[in-house]
């Protein structure tokens, strides 16, 4: 078995293990040394003394097994040896044994009795909390001895175990509370980074240890730089788009006023294509940051896309689409994502399906077509911005190769991803995974 598989994955569990495991090992070593060097030695001497007293009383009774001698021996044991002695006439030793929770108890007493007695014996260290029951076989029955427990075993063993258990519980409680307070700021930082990656607004205050505070401040500074970069990029592309649209509008107006010829029609189509390219550039520059996440139904968005395709005379099969797919996200970005995938499929196939599936933690939307498809080694290249494969499945003949890249960015901004694969229809399958 790989030891790495036994190590907890979470920081809280690992930190707790780092603190508690060495202490637990130390306490086990201390406990072993205590029982081996102190408790067992003291208990062995006490057990040998108690076994010697039992052997003495047994020997005195065997010398004269009369009732009068039994009375004298019993009184002597009670007054001078702190032993309670009783004769069980015509009785036999019990056959069953009751083992102690701590085996050292039985082991020490059995060794002492075996060294002091020649007769068969039996004992029980578990039945009575304050006494040890010892029985010795004699002529005519069994002598039963009840000895105080502190005469047989060292009384510090139980107190030591309770002290160790209490110290362990106290240490574990303090460790859990302390580590929990240290890990919580890191969990908030990880959650904030995840939410920021999905485009959500994040409020985060530095807390915790100095290292975690420094990491939080670094994250906040990084978030500010990213937001400034996005704003600068959007403003730059918006300015370029605005500056270019003005001469393009003049060109369109001039072309509209010129006589209709083949060359004029081709120039007019070029101007329209340039406007479409500018729109794609601007959409890619804006990314997914223009709107706030809100509760939505992905199935409803998908059905709107199917209806949009039907209005231009293109059929998209949505029979395998669930009735409802509730989640949280940005409606415009998600609609753009699915629209790009459907438009890409319609550009290269005459049979397109839009289906859904769902797991415990995610929603999947699949767009399939029967087009030429893409070779598996070109999947990553097809998802890159401005990628134009040749022979081009991803070659957007009406654009600049941003359709799949925009769809992937939209999925990633919602904490999901876009993958490409082979469709059951023979063409390409584009699958979007979005967390619930």
Image (spheres, helix red, strand yellow):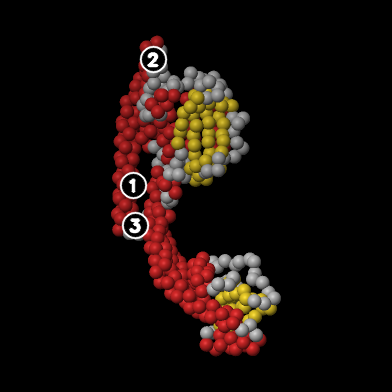
Residue furthest to the top: 262
- Which of the two discs, 2 and 1, labels the residue nearer the N terminus? 1
The span from disc 3 to disc 2 (Cα, nearest Å) is 60 Å
User: Please, is residue 205 above or below residue 388 in the view?
Assistant: below
Which residue is identified by label 3?
206
Q: Residue at x 32, y 26 (%)?
A: 247
Task: Find out whether the residues at labels 3 and 2 contact each other: C-beta distance under 8 Å.
Answer: no
User: Please, is residue 246 above or below residue 189 in the view?
Assistant: above
Mark in front: 1 vs 3: 3
Is 274 on the left-hand or right-hand side of 374? left
Query: Which sits in the foreground, 43 or 232?
Result: 43
Q: Residue at x 34, y 25 (%)?
A: 248
Task: Find out whether the residues at labels 1 and 3 contact each other: C-beta distance under 8 Å.
Answer: no
Q: Secondary structure at mark 3?
A: loop
Residue 214 in sight: yes
Q: Residue at x 34, y 35 (%)?
A: 238
Q: Using the rendered view, name the quadrant where residue 239 is placed.
A: top left
The span from disc 1 to disc 3 (Cα, nearest Å) is 14 Å
The quadrant the N terminus occupies is: top left
Mark in front: 2 vs 1: 1
Where residue 84 sits in the image (x, y, percent)? Answer: 59, 83
* Other residues around mark 2 within 10 Å, as few (<14) / some (14–19) / many (≥20): few
The disc placed on residue 266 is 2
Where residue 86 sits in the image (x, y, percent)? Answer: 63, 81
Is 154 on the left-hand or right-hand side of 213? right
Where residue 81 sits in the image (x, y, percent)? Answer: 52, 85
Query: Which sits in the foreground, 289 or 38?
Result: 38
Is 236 on the left-hand or right-hand side of 96? left
The span from disc 2 to disc 1 (Cα, nearest Å) is 46 Å
Q: Secondary structure at mark 2?
A: helix
Which residue is identified by label 1?
223
């Amino acid at each position: 078995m790989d030891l790495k598989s036994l190590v907890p994955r979470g920081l809280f569990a690992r930190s707790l293990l780092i603190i508690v495991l060495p202490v637990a090992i130390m306490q086990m070593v201390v406990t072993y040394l205590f029982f081996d060097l102190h408790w067992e030695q003291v208990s062995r001497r006490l057990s040998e003394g108690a076994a010697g007293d039992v052997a003495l009383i047994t020997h005195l009774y065997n010398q004269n097994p009369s009732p009068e001698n039994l009375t004298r021996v019993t009184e002597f044991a009670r007054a001078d040896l702190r032993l309670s002695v009783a004769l069980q006439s015509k009785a036999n030793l019990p056959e069953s044994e009751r083992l102690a929770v701590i085996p050292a108890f039985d082991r020490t007493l059995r060794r002492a009795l075996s060294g002091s007695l020649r007769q068969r014996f039996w004992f029980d260290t578990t039945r009575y909390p304050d006494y040890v029951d010892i029985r010795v076989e004699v002529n005519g029955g069994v002598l039963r001895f009840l000895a105080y427990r502190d005469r047989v075993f060292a009384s510090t063993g139980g107190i030591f175990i309770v002290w160790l258990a209490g110290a362990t519980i106290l240490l574990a409680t303090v460790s859990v509370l302390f580590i929990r307070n240290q890990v919580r700021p890191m969990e908030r930082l990880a959650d904030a980074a995840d939410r920021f990656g999905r485009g959500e607004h994040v409020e985060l205050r530095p807390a915790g240890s100095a290292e975690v505070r420094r990491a939080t401040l670094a994250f906040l500074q990084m978030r500010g730089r990213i937001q400034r970069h996005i704003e600068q990029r959007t403003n730059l592309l918006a300015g370029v788009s605005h500056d270019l649209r003005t001469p393009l509008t003049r060109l369109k107006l001039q072309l509209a006023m010129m006589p209709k010829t083949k060359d004029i029609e081709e120039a007019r189509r070029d101007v329209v294509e340039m406007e479409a390219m500018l729109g794609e550039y601007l959409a890619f520059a804006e990314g997914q940051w223009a709107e706030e996440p809100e509760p939505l139904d992905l199935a409803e968005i998908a059905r709107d896309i199917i209806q949009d395709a039907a209005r231009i005379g293109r059929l998209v099969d949505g029979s395998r689409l669930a009735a409802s797919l509730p989640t949280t996200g940005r409606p415009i970005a998600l609609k753009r994502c699915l629209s790009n995938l459907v438009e890409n499929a319609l550009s290269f196939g005459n049979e397109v399906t839009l289906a859904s599936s769902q797991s415990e933690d995610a929603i999947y939307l699949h767009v399939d077509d029967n087009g030429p498809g893409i070779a598996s080694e070109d999947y990553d290249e097809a998802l890159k911005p401005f990628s134009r494969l040749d022979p081009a499945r991803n070659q957007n003949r009406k654009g600049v190769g941003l359709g799949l890249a925009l769809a992937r960015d939209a999925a990633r901004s919602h904490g999901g991803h876009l993958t490409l694969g082979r469709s059951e229809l023979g063409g390409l399958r584009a699958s979007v995974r979005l967390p619930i």
